[in-house]
Amino acid sequence: MSEIKNICVYCASSPQIAPVYFEAAERLGYLLAEKGINLIDGAGKVGLMGCLNNTVLAAGGTVTGVIPRFMVERGWHHSGLTQLMETETMHERKELMTKMSDAVIALPGGCGTMEELLEIITWKQLGLYDKPIVILNTCGFYNPLIEMLEKAIDQHFMRREHEALWEIAFTPDEAVNLCCTIPLWNKEIRKFAEV
């Protein structure tokens, strides 16, 4: 296990979701600030991302936001972050967020969040990312995706060993604890990349 200094969080930018999701984002923000863990995210100013950013900053923590230039030009970025890093493309954004992180937590979200989550799981499967990946399954939001991943394993699209690529948490406290206790992934697992 390595020391967790930076956690990358994938999450929704929609402001129209149920309060329970915002409550979980707030709790996660307080925990990160309290533990002195820098938040890395997509630099958004609304939705769960905006809530998370505001909470970490209000609690005295730090936030590194990574966002493509075209989004900054549209004014979608949070202007009060500790550090704002602009990229040319979405791909560069995701790669930079990943490189700077010591762990990843996925909060509920739409296509963008799920795409980021599935990509980082794939990178771990291929031995390109060896750090903790935690799915924060607030109110069972990710149950269908978890069932789909289990189905892929059951029907031999993935190996049973791949089930250990991610961990599932049900509270922000559990998610942060998992990030701090899951050992690094053995990159030799890439031998299992072929089913």
Image (tube, rainbow, N blue to C red):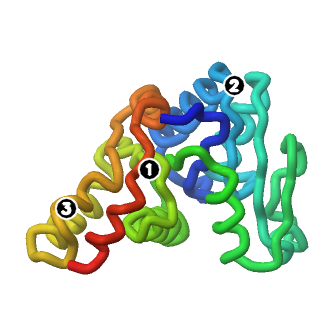
Give the Cα separation between the discs numbered 1 and 3. Answer: 17 Å
Q: Point out residue 78 in the picture as x, y percentages from the top left corner.
A: 82, 52
What residue is rendered at 59% in x and 31% in y? 3
Q: Point out residue 144 in the picture as x, y percentages from the top left corner.
A: 25, 62
Q: Point out residue 191 in the picture as x, y percentages from the top left corner.
A: 30, 71
Mark 2 or mark 1: name the one nearer the start of the chain: 2
What residue is rendered at 50% in x and 60% in y? 129
Q: Residues within 10 Å of mark 2 (few under 14, many from 20)?
A: some
Element marked by disc 1: strand
Write down the quadrant of residue 51 in the picture.
top right
Q: Where 66 falls versus 136 (above or below)?
A: below
Is 158 left, or right, of 58 in this rendering? left
Q: Amino acid at mark 1?
A: Ile
Q: Nearer the viewer, mark 1 or mark 3?
A: 1
Write down the quadrant of residue 82 in the picture.
top right
Disc 1 designates what residue? 133
Is 12 left, or right, of 149 in this rendering? right
Q: Amino acid at mark 2?
A: Gly
Q: Amino acid at mark 3?
A: Glu
Disc 3 designates what residue? 147
Whether residue 43 is visible here, answered yes or no, is yes
Disc 2 designates what residue? 36
Give the Cα separation between the discs numbered 2 and 1. Answer: 19 Å
Q: Point out residue 97 in the picture as x, y percentages from the top left corner.
A: 67, 58
Q: Residues within 10 Å of mark 1 (few under 14, many from 20)?
A: many
